[in-house]
């Protein structure tokens, strides 16, 4: 079907940094006020460009994408299954873990095929079963931004933040990213959230920071609330299985089942109830659909995971969510914490806690070249940031289980973060 003009002739990678409204804290450290992402463009002989996106960036990420050009030039983008074996053959992956690179290229190839056919990506993937995808409000403890605003540290600040997000976006499901403060303190925060959001659903995700017994005790302490699930309270399939044997709350994961081997292990000897599918970590939209099919067969739950997306990756999550019949849980997105986006028209909007599935050809989003240039320049100015370091405790790193949580009484901007703010006075949050 394809002629030579529809074959790949070039690939490009551009690192951007897009500001967040305030730094987001998690169990290992923080996002220091911005996301770093790599925008991938795949071009065919007739000048059509498909878009992909990758987490992180800088010279090494850009080089990793560019190094695959010899593999891709001359390839028909419609052959996405062949692409998997060309660049991420499982038996070669011991030496070259390219799953996330494959994902970015799969997005771009699907975008190209859709654009050429005049069809949205969801039509290439079985067709949509819904027009909108529901999202959870992703709640983080936050350091204040450059302007001094946006701190989320106390239960009162957390509740105010959640209500504001609900007012702006219509969220009916709320996920608290935890594992930052002592567990008893976070339990109080979570219970106050539940009290302030009657009728809404809740999720708690400490990124595996708790021990097994602490996780079981925490689950017992929230069992009376309207929990969608408890996400990765502890680490490892065996730890999660022990927790699951001792709670009635469904367990979810984006850490212990992130490939088909682990999915098989979890089917044979269940450790979790809900698999959070990530279009990047699983190697593309199509592997997520395959995994969702396995979950449908074994009646495991699914949801859509967020690893911190701009509009291109968000579009992949929307097309994925559109085609999964068994998606009855809200998706996660960091998206509402972004101050801006690199797509034409600016950030996609929420309505009633949902985002409409794009209906244009391909992924249905277009790159805003001015924004791309602006945020590529911001990356050159600011560089990367240590995602697994807490600016409030520069010499600290967590053990597993964590026994040294942050102090909930430590208010304001910590010195290391202030120093970062001061070094780039012209940068926005
Ligand atoms: Mg998680």
Image (cartoon, helix red, strand yellow):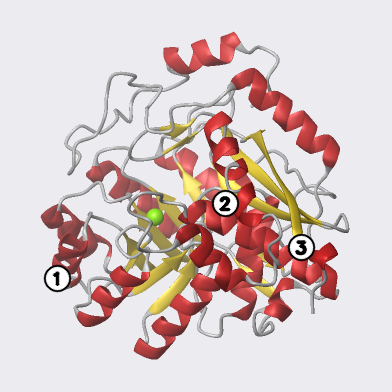
Q: Residue furthest right?
A: 46
Residue 209 position in % (x across, y down): 25, 46
Indicate which label's residue lies in the foreground, 3 or 2: 3
Could you tell me which residue is drawn at 52 percent across and 33 percent down?
Answer: 60
Relative to residue 85, is residue 71 depicted above or below?
Answer: above
Q: Identify the secondary structure beneath mark 1.
A: loop
Q: Residue at x 11, y 56 (%)?
A: 213
Where residue 113 sits: x, y (%)?
76, 70
Q: Secondary structure at mark 2?
A: helix
- Residue 393: image quadrant is top left
Residue 269 x %, y %: 19, 78
**Residue 125's x, y, as percent?**
65, 79
- To which residue does mark 3 refer? 7
Circle 2 is placed at which residue position? 163
Q: Secondary structure at mark 3?
A: loop
The answer to whether marks 3 and 2 mark residues whose Cβ atoms lie closer than 8 Å is no
Q: In the image, which disc is placed on residue 246?
A: 1
């Amino acid at each position: 079907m394809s002629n030579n003009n529809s074959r790949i002739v070039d690939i490009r990678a551009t690192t951007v940094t897009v500001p967040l409204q305030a730094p987001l804290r998690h169990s290992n450290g923080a996002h220091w006020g911005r996301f770093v992402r790599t925008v991938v463009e795949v071009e065919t002989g007739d000048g059509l460009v498909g878009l992909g996106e990758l987490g992180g960036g800088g010279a090494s990420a850009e080089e990793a994408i560019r190094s695959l050009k010899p593999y891709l030039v001359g390839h028909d983008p419609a052959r996405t299954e062949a692409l998997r074996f060309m660049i991420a053959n499982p038996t070669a992956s011991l030496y070259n873990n390219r799953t996330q690179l494959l994902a970015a290229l799969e997005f771009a190839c699907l975008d190209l095929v859709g654009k050429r056919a005049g069809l949205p990506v969801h039509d290439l993937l079985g067709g949509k079963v819904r027009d909108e995808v529901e999202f959870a409000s992703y709640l983080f403890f936050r350091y204040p931004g450059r302007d001094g605003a946006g701190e989320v540290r106390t239960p009162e600040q957390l509740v105010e933040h959640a209500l504001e997000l609900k007012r702006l976006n219509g969220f009916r499901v709320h996920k608290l990213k935890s594992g930052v403060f002592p567990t008893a303190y976070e339990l109080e925060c979570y219970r106050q959230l539940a009290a302030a959001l009657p009728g809404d659903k809740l999720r708690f995700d400490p990124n595996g920071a708790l021990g097994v017994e602490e996780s079981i005790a925490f689950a017992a302490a929230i069992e009376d609330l309207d929990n969608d699930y408890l996400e990765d309270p502890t680490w490892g399939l065996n730890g999660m299985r022990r927790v699951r044997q001792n709670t009635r709350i469904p367990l979810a994961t984006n850490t212990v089942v992130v490939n088909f081997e682990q999915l098989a292990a979890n089917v044979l000897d269940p450790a979790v109830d809900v698999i959070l599918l990530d279009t990047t970590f699983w190697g593309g939209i199509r592997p997520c659909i395959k995994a969702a099919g396995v979950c449908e067969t074994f009646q495991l739950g699914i949801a859509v995971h967020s690893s911190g997306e701009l509009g291109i990756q968000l579009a992949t999550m929307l097309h994925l969510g559109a085609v999964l019949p068994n998606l009855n849980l809200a998706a996660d997105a960091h998206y509402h914490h972004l101050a801006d986006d690199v797509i034409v028209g600016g950030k996609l909007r929420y309505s009633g806690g949902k985002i409409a599935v794009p209906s244009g050809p391909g992924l249905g989003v277009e790159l805003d070249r001015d924004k791309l240039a602006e945020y590529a320049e911001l990356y050159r100015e600011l560089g990367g940031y240590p995602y697994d370091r807490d600016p409030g405790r520069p010499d600290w790193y967590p053990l597993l289980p964590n026994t040294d949580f942050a102090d909930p009484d430590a208010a304001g901007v910590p010195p290391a973060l202030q120093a970062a703010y001061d070094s780039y006075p012209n940068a926005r949050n």
